[in-house]
Image (tube, helix red, strand yellow):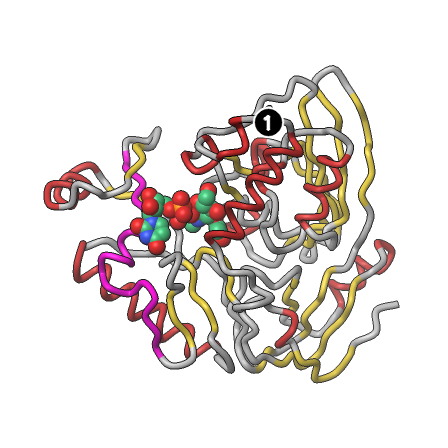
Amino acid sequence: MLEPNPLADLTQANTLALRAQAARLVRLTALTDVPAVADLPGPVFILGGGSNVVLPPQMAGTVVKVELRGIREVASGPKGVILEAGAGESWHDFVAYGVARGLGGLENLALIPGTVGAAPVQNIGAYGLEISERIVGVTTYDLKAHVWQEWTPQACAFAYRDSAFKRAEPGRWLITAVRVRLPHRWQPRLDYPDLRQHPAWADTPPTPAAVFDAVCAIRRAKLPDPAVLPNAGSFFKNPVVDVPTYRAIAASHASLPAWPQADGGVKLAAAWLIEQAGWKGRRLGAVGMHERHALVLVNHGGANADDVLRLSEAVQTAVRARFGVGLEREPVMPAAS
Ligand code: EPU
């Protein structure tokens, strides 16, 4: 039975720790209750770990906190082992589950905050790996058509920090479970410079567990822990620009980090653009861009969504003025009541 909890405080339910209240909050813990979500007073907003959202102070409708649990091995075939996790499991715990069984394949994505169900929505990625490379299936309930569906990776239409779940009709599909394949023939993925140069490889072979530990160490050194300094990870996507724009910036900035893309564009480092535009470590009211990583917007205490929007717009304006490049926000912003 879904039991709505009126006027729930969500300040602890979002990693930016923004002051936010839901008109109604429902905790979804059982698969048998999933179809009933479609009948809750709308708008319905699906909340996972709250690590990629900018919540408004007052949320209309019903917030559904997905707490569907369970991790299991569903199959072992010639290509690898298939693991399935309930959408409400912690993403990091799912990564650790595979690593603890000697199964490699997710270790580069260790310590990413949030839940399993949120991972395919934004196609989480870090240290040279995107989850789209491992996903073999996603189970959803369509809140509009009232049907269960199984999604192939192709149907998910994954792209950089994007998917059909985010792009087409956000909120229509309630993700209940995600399946990944972890290859038997595992190869460490050490393309990312910090990881390749990690001192551990001088005396340790890169096993799944060793890569997992290295990724955790790199993230801890570089990125603020949301439990200590509230944040939502990268606040903007890395922008992809055309070659003339890239050349114009690179002509006067030899240190510009850039990655050519298959489609002919060039991806630039948003963190670098923000730092050059003078916003690294700078505050605006209760929020600021982190002093060790310019792409991470942090809440120094007591901020709300308006504070975040103001800083986000100031940073976008500064980067556009300096480089003529637009930055796109990464976290989603549900409507206020
Ligand atoms: N850089 C700066 N200033 C800074 C920080 C970084 O100039 O303050 C430069 C670095 O020197 C580097 C470049 O920017 O040349 C890229 O920085 P980094 O390697 O830290 O990665 P990123 O592009 O900023 C992306 C993901 C992260 C992921 C890392 C590692 C996006 C939006 N972000 O960040 O993902 O952990 O790569 O793979 O793609 C997240 O999405 O929340 C997230 C943390």
Amino acid type indicated by mark 1: Thr
Horizontal side of 28 relative to 191 (left or right) equals right
Residue 281 forms part of the magenta stretch? yes
Q: Residue at x 47, y 73 (%)?
A: 299
Image spot of residue 287 (x, y percent)? 42, 75
Above/below status of 319 relative to 285: above
Q: Position of residue 101 (x, y in %)?
A: 78, 32
Q: Is residue 212 left or right of residue 89?
A: left
**Can residue 78 be seen?**
yes
Residue under numbered circle 1: 204
For the point 66% across and 48% down, the residue is 92
In-image side of 149 versus 186 (left or right):
right
Residue under the point 28% across and 39% down: 258
Q: Quadrant of the N terminus?
A: bottom right
Of all residues, the one furthest to the top in this rendering is 78
| In this picture, residue 267 sits left or right of residue 330 | left
Label 1 beta carbon within 8 A of ligand 1: no
Residue 6 drawn at (x, y percent): 74, 83
Region of the chain picked out in magenta, as a range: 265-284
Residue 295 appears in which quarter of the rendering?
Answer: bottom left
Vertical placement of residue 257 versus 233, above or below: above
Placement of the C terminus among the 4 image quadrants: bottom right
Instruction: Please state the horizontal and vertical placement of residue 325, each as a whole percent of the image.
Output: 23, 53
Q: Toward the viewer: 138 or 291?
A: 291
Is residue 94 rendered magenta in the image?
no
